[in-house]
Image: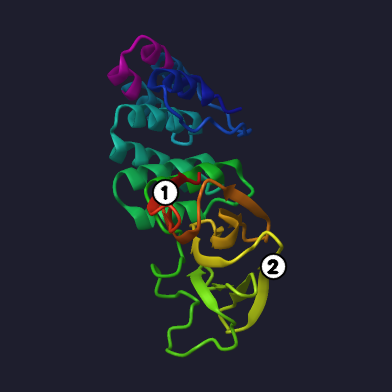
């Protein structure tokens, strides 16, 4: 049974900032008595503030039992707390060597890689976490915080599905805004039709969103999660449309919004009616 919450919870209280809470999982293995003694001693040393002794204790427990997952997690958490990011990353990678289904370890590898400036590796680790897993949301937050494009995203990956040849998409009435997602889809707003069209990588045009909510859409922007933001000029608001087509009003505190731009977790709105650019936190 995993007990990795013991030290991680203590570190959370001391750091006064968010840290990945251990996912409750059951791991079937028998820990040798000598390794368990060193592990418990390391926990005690940590509680007394003897961090170097705690690190040494976890390393000894791992040496005695190389598959001691709890010890890896707690050692990684402690090294992260001590800002020894390179060493912490190496420890969490040892967890993944033993199981690529340890999604908390994948999240921590993504976080630490981002902190170390290795954005491609961070994106790779995030892509390995199922979207249904709770650590995917935490990992996605890493992408936002460090402005990392997901693995395979348009503009950052030579294998992008967006067409790489010159040409035109015809028969779009009064097009005003345009953006794309990481799957190679193009989104175009039609001002006079109050419609958002979607053009697939193979060039097929289809209706993406049409509703009485849309009134004079001007520019569009997209974020790393595939959400589309609409400068809804005549309605004096900003709409957020998810990849599944769910639409909400992100803010109505704008007058004649004309341009939108996403950078990380911030949305910038050029407001023609008030001669200003607004900043809106979107996550």
Question: Foreground: 270 or 40?
Answer: 270
Q: Looking at the image, which residue is at 55% across and 50% down?
A: 129
| In magenta stretch: residue 47 | yes
Pick out the residue farthest to the front: 273
The residue labelled by disc 2 is 210
How far from the left and from the top, in percent, is residue 229?
54, 58
Question: Foreground: 179 or 56?
Answer: 179
How far from the left and from the top, in percent, is residue 109?
41, 44
Disc 2, SS: strand
Question: Foreground: 19 or 155?
Answer: 155
**Quarter containing the N terminus:** top right
Q: Is residue 178 above or below residue 118?
A: below
In the picture, the disc for residue 278 is 1
In the picture, the disc for residue 66 is none
Question: Foreground: 84 or 3?
Answer: 84
Instruction: Tell me where residue 142 sits by quadrant.
Output: top left
Disc 1, SS: strand
Task: Provide the residue span drawn in magenta.
Answer: 43-55
Left or right of 96 in this view: 212: right
Q: Looking at the image, which residue is at 28% across and 33% down?
A: 84
Left or right of 167 in this view: 45: left
* Camera sees residue 102: no
How far from the left and from the top, in percent, is residue 203?
58, 84
In space, the residues marked 2 and 1 are separated at their CA atoms by 26 Å
How far from the left and from the top, in percent, is residue 230?
55, 61
Q: Looking at the image, which residue is at 39% across and 18% down?
A: 14
Pick out the residue farthest to the right: 212
Between disc 2 and disc 1, whose residue precedes? 2
- Magenta residues: mostly which secondary structure? helix
Q: Looking at the image, which residue is at 52% across and 54% down?
A: 128
| In magenta stretch: residue 138 | no
């Amino acid at each position: 049974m995993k007990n990795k919450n013991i030290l991680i919870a203590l570190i959370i209280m001391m750091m006064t900032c968010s840290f990945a809470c251990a996912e409750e999982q059951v791991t079937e293995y028998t820990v040798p008595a000598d390794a368990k003694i060193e592990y418990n001693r390391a926990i005690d040393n940590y509680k007394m503030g003897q961090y170097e002794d705690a690190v040494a204790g976890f390393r000894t427990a791992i040496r005695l039992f190389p598959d001691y997952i709890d010890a890896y997690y707690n050692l990684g958490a402690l090294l992260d707390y001590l800002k020894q990011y390179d060493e912490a990353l190496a420890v969490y990678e040892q967890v993944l060597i033993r199981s690529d289904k340890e999604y908390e370890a994948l999240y921590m590898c993504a976080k630490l890689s981002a902190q170390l400036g290795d954005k491609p590796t961070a994106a790779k680790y995030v892509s390995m976490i199922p979207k249904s897993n709770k650590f995917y949301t935490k990992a996605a937050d890493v992408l936002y915080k460090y402005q990392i494009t997901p693995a395979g995203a348009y503009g950052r990956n030579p294998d992008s599905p967006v067409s790489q040849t010159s040409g035109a998409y015809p028969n779009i009435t009064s097009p005003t805004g345009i953006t794309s997602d990481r799957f190679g889809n193009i989104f175009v707003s039609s001002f006079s039709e109050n419609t958002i069209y979607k053009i697939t990588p193979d060039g097929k045009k289809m209706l993406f969103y049409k509703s009485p909510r849309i009134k004079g859409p001007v520019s569009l922007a997209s974020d790393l999660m595939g959400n589309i933001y609409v400068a809804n000029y005549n309605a004096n608001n900003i709409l957020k449309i998810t990849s599944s087509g769910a639409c909400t009003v992100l803010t109505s505190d704008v007058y004649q919004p004309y341009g939108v731009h996403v950078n990380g977790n911030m949305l910038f709105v050029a407001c023609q009616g008030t001669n200003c650019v607004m900043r809106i936190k979107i996550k």
